[in-house]
């Protein structure tokens, strides 16, 4: 069994390290890395989601093992990446579709923090919003070396999200899905719109916390992943 994992905006494949340690005995966690991030930081950033999904689809196709079932797991922006990769999988029919999809911390619409502010490309705005999302340790908030490396990643990914045509998320499938969310981060009325995309079984699992609530709940999430993948 394989689980292909797609990080959040500005994030790297290492975000899924804890999940990998929780699942290691049963599931091969395939942590995907975006161009310009982490181990691929010397590569150019994507200009749009078509570039991102094309690259991610190629990685999934290359690592996919025909003899095994697999799932897709996207966190925050990674949820949108999962949808776009899933479109390619269903259209190309070069590999089997996933047996389950897991999404976290994002609905099928632009987050209001990015939608409602005209200053979203400025350095200070990106820093402020990223800190408010809760993903930056207090020790790094004023660390200039940290921001020199990661600020361009956040800016590039926020730009992708701003350019993404959420009103044209033209996919509807029967693949079962599980959505992890926090009411204080993304209200349920917005989260439940995933049922328009995943029209079969679509389960919602609520946790307390901010945007990165999953960090405190990886073991519980891992158990849900195992249960949904019938392990």
Image (cartoon, helix red, strand yellow):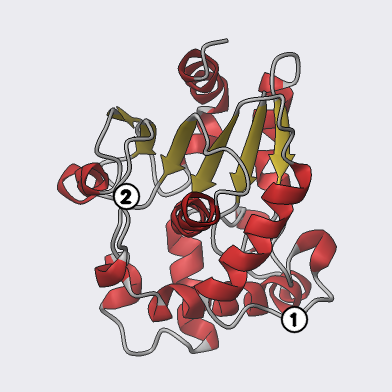
The alpha-carbon separation of the residues under discs 1 and 2 comes to 30 Å
- Using residue 164 as the reference point, say whether residue 74 is left or right of it: right
- Quadrant where the C terminus lies? top right
Note whether 210 is above or below 87 in the view shown: above
Name the residue that disc number 1 marks.
44
Q: Find out whether the residues at labels 1 and 2 contact each other: C-beta distance under 8 Å.
A: no
Foreground residue among 181 and 34:
34
Q: Residue furthest left?
A: 189
- In the rendered image, residue 17, in percent from the top left (x then y), is placed at 72, 37
At x 32% / y 55%, what residue is drawn? Answer: 171
- In the rendered image, residue 195, in percent from the top left (x then y), is placed at 23, 42
Name the residue that disc number 2 marks.
185
At x 62% / y 49%, what residue is drawn? Answer: 94
- In the rendered image, residue 160, in percent from the top left (x then y), is placed at 49, 76
Q: Earlier in the sequence, mark 1 or mark 2?
A: 1
Foreground residue among 12 and 143:
12
Q: Residue furthest front?
A: 93
Task: Mark 2: give few (<14), some (14-19) or many (20+) Cα within 10 Å.
Answer: some
């Amino acid at each position: 069994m394989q689980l292909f994992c797609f990080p959040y905006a500005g994030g790297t494949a290492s975000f899924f390290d804890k999940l990998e340690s929780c699942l290691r005995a049963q599931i091969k966690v395939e942590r995907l890395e975006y161009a310009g991030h982490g181990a691929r930081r010397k590569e150019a950033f994507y200009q749009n989601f078509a570039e991102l999904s094309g690259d991610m689809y190629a990685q999934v196709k290359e690592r996919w093992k025909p003899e095994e079932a697999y799932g897709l797991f996207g966190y925050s922006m990674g949820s949108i990446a999962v949808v776009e990769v899933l479109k390619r999988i269903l259209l190309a029919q070069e590999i089997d579709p996933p047996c389950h999809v897991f999404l976290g911390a994002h609905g099928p619409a632009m987050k209001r923090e990015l939608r409602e502010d005209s200053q979203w490309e400025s350095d200070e705005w990106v820093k402020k919003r990223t800190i408010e999302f809760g993903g930056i340790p207090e020790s790094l908030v004023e660390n200039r070396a940290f921001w020199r490396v990661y600020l361009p990643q956040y800016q590039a990914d926020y730009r992708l999200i701003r350019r993404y045509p959420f009103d044209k998320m033209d996919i509807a499938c029967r693949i079962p899905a599980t959505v992890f969310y926090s009411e204080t981060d993304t209200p349920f009325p917005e989260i439940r719109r995933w049922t328009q995309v995943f029209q079969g079984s679509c389960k919602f699992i609520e946790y307390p916390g901010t945007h990165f609530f999953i960090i405190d709940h990886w073991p519980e999430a891992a158990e849900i992943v195992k249960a949904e993948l019938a392990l």
